[in-house]
Amino acid sequence: MAAHGSPPHRSWSLRRRLVVGIVALLAVVSAVVGVLSVLALRQTLVARLDEQVQDAVARTAGPGQPVPQVDADEPGNRIGTLIVRVHDGEVVRAEYVADDGTDVELTDAQVQQVLALQLADGRATTVRLGDLGEFRIASRATPPGAQPDGPTDDIVIAGLPTAELNATTANLALIFGLVTLVALVIAALAGTQVVRIALLPLGRVTATARRVAELPLARGQVALADRVADADPNTEVGQVGAAFNRMLEHVESSLVARHESEEKVRQFVADASHELRTPLASIRGYSELTRRTGHELPDDIVYALSRIESESVRMTSLVEELLLLARLDAGQEVVAGEVDLVPLLGHAVSDAHAAAPDHDWRVEAGSDPVLVTGDPNRLHQVLANLLANARLHTPAGTLVTASLEVADDRQSPDRQPPEAVVTIADDGPGIPPDLLPVLFERFARGDGSRTRATGGTGLGLAIVSAVVEAHGGTVTVTSSPGDTRFIVRLPLASADR
């Protein structure tokens, strides 16, 4: 588990993993080939050097040569040849050919180091003789067949330096390393381009997915016209594209079915609301007529008629609001025109003050007009519903402030167009936190101080949200005890204002 505060792990992209995998595989193969080639060359060079060492031994231990009279420079001995000869247990010769061709005597330590080796007759071995470097040496006992560690008349030891062999092997390893490095760089660059070209279809799949993700799928009729062109089932990317196309077709059919179902429900609500308006008006009218006939009626009948009248009024309000929401969902009931929000806000606050004089009502708006494009009746309904919400759900004496300002963020990095911002704030008890996420849903009801005790329908804020969205704006709410704010943002009628 990553430590607290550590940066999140960033996983590699498919392109990077493929390129790194190709380069790593090429590096491993190149390393194996290089190591095997260097080892094979070294074995070949060692075998050739051993043959030369055996030739040197044979020349030095030639038959019929009296030991004391042997010339140090046998024909064919090259620079660096080492000769040690033992006769009757005594070293009678211990020298090597220097770079200038002269014979140089070996030191006693070097002689003892050579003699300490367990040399098998005719087989070469490697030994390092201090400053002289590394040698391949071999021995021969004379007469032929005698053992170096047994009684013999003569033992000949000859050797050749391995410096040239080591230099050749090191040079080959260096060349392999440099060539491999260059090849890996070229492979990385070429592999990046090859993988990029190979993944272009996957990029087109991603682009299609992004375009689909930007479509407004939450509501309304949806048409998913985008499809992935790379849908060849014979390729891996094509299989992804084909699966993505099938998913889009399934999503499109599901959205069409959902839209048709919503349309049926919306049409049913609209039709039912429209049809209910007439009988509700009749019920209300007959109840009023019966109550005003002047006949003496029992108290219980008068009470029942008053309840029928009040409930018919409440049902009529509910039906009207449902019909309005159905029409707003269908894109109706919004008349485009230029509306000045300053007098509209003033009238709405005046109406709220008349309805609830026990609240403290304040208006904060300048004298300059703030023009938006929309339906004045619906915008007045938005303000009236928000003020009524503050009036109904706060106790007497609550301060309710309605403010209007213009927010111009065109100088900010986001370059947002100028907006009219209406804020309805109160210092009441606040909205329960669990109610905030669903506050603008239909028939949303709160508990405690915000519970409607006046027979409200629970559609006021839903109408606010629908009307504001129909005008291209947004409505948000923040609430804490003593500070509740409903903020409505509407685009100005002219972007130059």
Image (cartoon, rainbow, N blue to C red):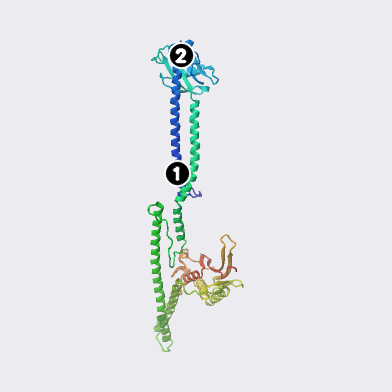
Q: Residue at x 47, y 20 (%)?
A: 159
Q: Is residue 403 left or right of residue 293?
A: right
> Which residue corresponds to the image point at 47% horizontal and 16% vertical from the top-left?
84
Residue behind mark 1: 22
Of mark 1 and mark 2, the one earlier in the sequence is 1
Percent from the top left, x then y, of residue 462?
A: 46, 70
Give the amino acid type for the residue marked by disc 1 in the picture. Ile
- Disc 2 residue type (three-letter): Val
Is residue 33 depicted above or below 379 in this figure? above
Q: Residue furthest right?
A: 367
Q: What crowding class fits label 2: few (fewer than 14 Cα within 10 Å), some (14-19), or many (20 or more)?
A: many
Residue 431 visible to an observer of this rendering? yes
**What kind of element bears circle 1?**
helix
Residue 425 visible in the displayed image: no
Residue 86: image tag: 2
Instruction: Specify few, some or many for label 1: CA neighbours under 10 Å numbering under 14, 14-19, or 20 or more.
Output: some
- Is residue 328 depicted above or below 237 in this figure? below
The number of numbered discs placed on residues in the rendered structure image is: 2
State the residue lying farthest toward the bottom: 294
Q: Nearer the viewer, residue 471 or 306?
A: 471
- Image quadrant for the C terminus? bottom right
